[in-house]
Amino acid sequence: MTLMRMPLFVWTWLITAYLLIAVGFIFVFTIGGLTGIILAIAPLDIALHDTCYVVAHFHYTMVAGSLFSLFAGAYYWLPKWTGHYYDEKLGKLHFWLSLIFFNVTFFPQHFLGLAGMPRRYADYPMQFADFNAISTIGAFGASFFGVRGRAAHASDARRLNPVHVIVAGVVLAIGFVLVLVAIVRAVTGA
């Protein structure tokens, strides 16, 4: 059976919010992995060490990987835990806004790092102002519209059982803490 002859219900299943977010995870994690290949080259690593390039690589690999995975898991499991479905259009909107604003925030930092802008600087030369402005716009957009994840559940808020929401939040928080503990143990070798 070719892809074009698949029944319509298969296509609607493939384009759900949690699968879009899972594909978004693959996209951003691949960008982080490709930038990691560049950092694996010793002369380039020396040149790019302590620049915004490393910041962008870290955020594409660790932050986007974590956030998009948590979002996909939440969109998949919360309806099963709570018995209430989210609005699919708002879930897709959440995905697109998160993906766009995340990339607008961190992709310009690759260029900043390649141009030599060090990280952890509050004041920088004017040659870096344009890419920093783009990155700042993306960060504001992500904080207001994309990454918070509230938009997809706003219409369901009046129907959800508060106990279910609290239990789901506690389970997600415990899972997040366990992931952080595993990362810390892996980094410190404990």
Image: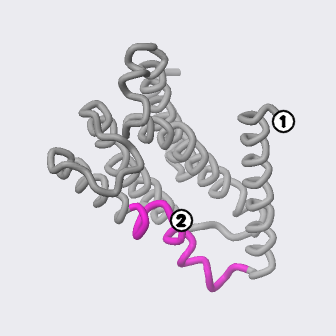
The secondary element bearing badge 1 is classed as loop
Residue 152 versus residue 109 in the image, above or below: below
Depth check: give the residue in front, 185 or 92.
185
Which of 7/43 is in front? 43
Q: Residue at x 80, y 50 (%)?
A: 178
Give the residue displayed 54% in from the left and 78% down from the top. 155
Q: Is residue 171 visible?
A: yes
The residue most toward the right is 190
Q: Residue at x 66, y 82 (%)?
A: 159
What residue would you read off at disc 1?
A: 190
Residue at the bottom extreme? 158
- Where does the magenta region start and end? 142-160
**15 lies above or below 186:** below
Residue ID for mark 2: 149
Q: Amino acid at mark 1?
A: Ala
Image spot of residue 186 (x, y percent) = 75, 34
SS class, disc 2: loop
How would you rate the neighbour count of disc 1 (Cα within 10 Å): few for under 14, some for 14-19, many for 20 or more?
A: few
The three-letter code of the residue at mark 2 reads Gly
Along the viewing direction, whichever of 168 and 93 lies nearer the viewer: 168
Residue 19, position as x, y percentages in the image: 56, 44
Relative vertical location of residue 26 with respect to residue 42 in this rendering, above or below: below
Of tags 1 and 2, the one toward the viewer is 1
Tell whether position 149 is magenta: yes
